[in-house]
Amino acid sequence: MAPLIHVAGHDIKVTTLDKVLFPDDGITKGDMLVHYLAVAEAMLPHLAGRPLTLRRFPHGLATEGFFQKDTGGRFPDWIDTVEVAHRHSEGSIRYVMCDDAASLLYLANQGTIEFHIWTATAADLDHPDRLVMDLDPPPGVTVAELRSVARRARDLYTGLGLTAYLQATGGRGYHVVAPLDRGADFTFVRDLAGRLASRLAADDPDRLTTAQRKNRRGDRIFLDVNRNGHAQTFIAPYSMRARPGATVATPLDWGELGRSTPNGFTTASIRRRLARKADPWAGMDDHAASPAAVRARLDALDADRQAST
């Protein structure tokens, strides 16, 4: 009989705990469940109320996983969901949400290794409260270069009235994220993020690019703002990554950047970190900015630059 874990008022049946999900590291499904229970307190505020895309590997990394958006009606009725209409066609998708530790454990038990979150919440699906720039390097870019670009993005954000938050993605790069006050729709925010990226790239065209096509990027760091579109997602803080090493997406203080690497935290080290350090992204909504005000400042900077040329 599969064991039951009682969490957040629900009995969760957990199965195949000894199944190896990360063959290169010997990490089992039971180890993954321990991780998500350990990080739940820090992670749940970043998941709560947001539609999720799940990246599931029921049989581990030795086989091909898949992304899941629609619940398909297969989850328990106590797990929150939200129905999102297709924008350009009939029909809808019912996304799962994760508002408590029971939901987190249940979804992890389904083989969900990665949790990807919307930049908007179910309370206002048309107005994002996060702006995300993903610093995506090609092979050969040093961590020192990435850190330099992250700082420049932070400085640009700050100068325009955005509060910049940093995340080591657990993969190749960093995210630079800013909280918003839900004062604009996805089209506005996507355009704003694109202008921020274009400004950074224009100041250093030999190292940075906004080119969508990989064959046009060369050896430059791609400033990816595609995650700001409607129904697009980014990796949730404290989510494991489905790659060898079982790395973990980790919010950082800016003072930690110089000692960090994008994939420097693992399931073991993140527990030690949270035992001694509060979540650097806690309270970020207290610093939400107006997208319209940010764009007005950017317009003024662009006008000044144009006048000086």
Image (cartoon, rainbow, N blue to C red):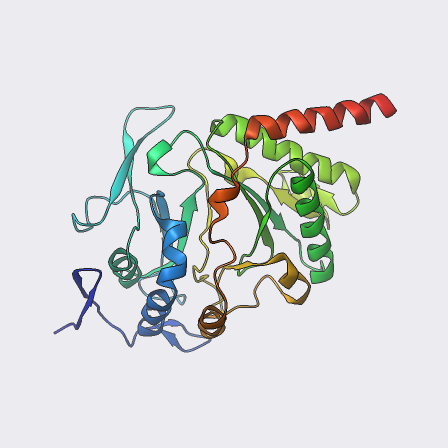
- The foreground one among 278 and 216 is 278
> Whole-percent x and y of residue 27?
39, 75
User: Is 242 on the left or on the right of 220, as rendered?
Assistant: left
| Residue that protrudes farthest toward the left in the picture | 1
- Res. 309 in view: no
**Residue at (60% x, 55% y) in the render:** 173
Q: Quadrant of residue 111?
A: bottom left
Residue at 75%, 26% in the rendered image: 302
Above or below for 89 versus 76: above
Number of on-image labels? 0
* Viewer-nearest residue: 191 or 130: 130
Point out the image quarter for the N terminus: bottom left
Q: Provide residue 177's location: percent of width, then percent of height.
A: 56, 46
At horizontal 29% and vertical 36% (from top left) the residue drawn is 93
The residue drawn where x is 47% and y is 43% is 285
Q: Residue furthest front?
A: 286
Residue 87, given in percent of the width and then of the height, sits at 37, 25
Residue 245 to residue 49: above or below: below
Q: Which quarter of the figure is the C terminus placed in?
A: top right
In the figure, residue 61 lies in which quadrant? bottom left
Can you say whether 36 is above or below 27 in the image? above
In the figure, is residue 44 to the left or right of 77? right
Q: Nearer the viewer, residue 253 or 224?
A: 253
> x, y (%) of residue 176?
59, 48
Instruction: Let me know if residue 298 appears in the view.
Output: yes
Question: In this orientation, which residue lies closer to the viewer: 228 or 276?
Answer: 276
Question: Which residue reaches farthest right?
Answer: 309
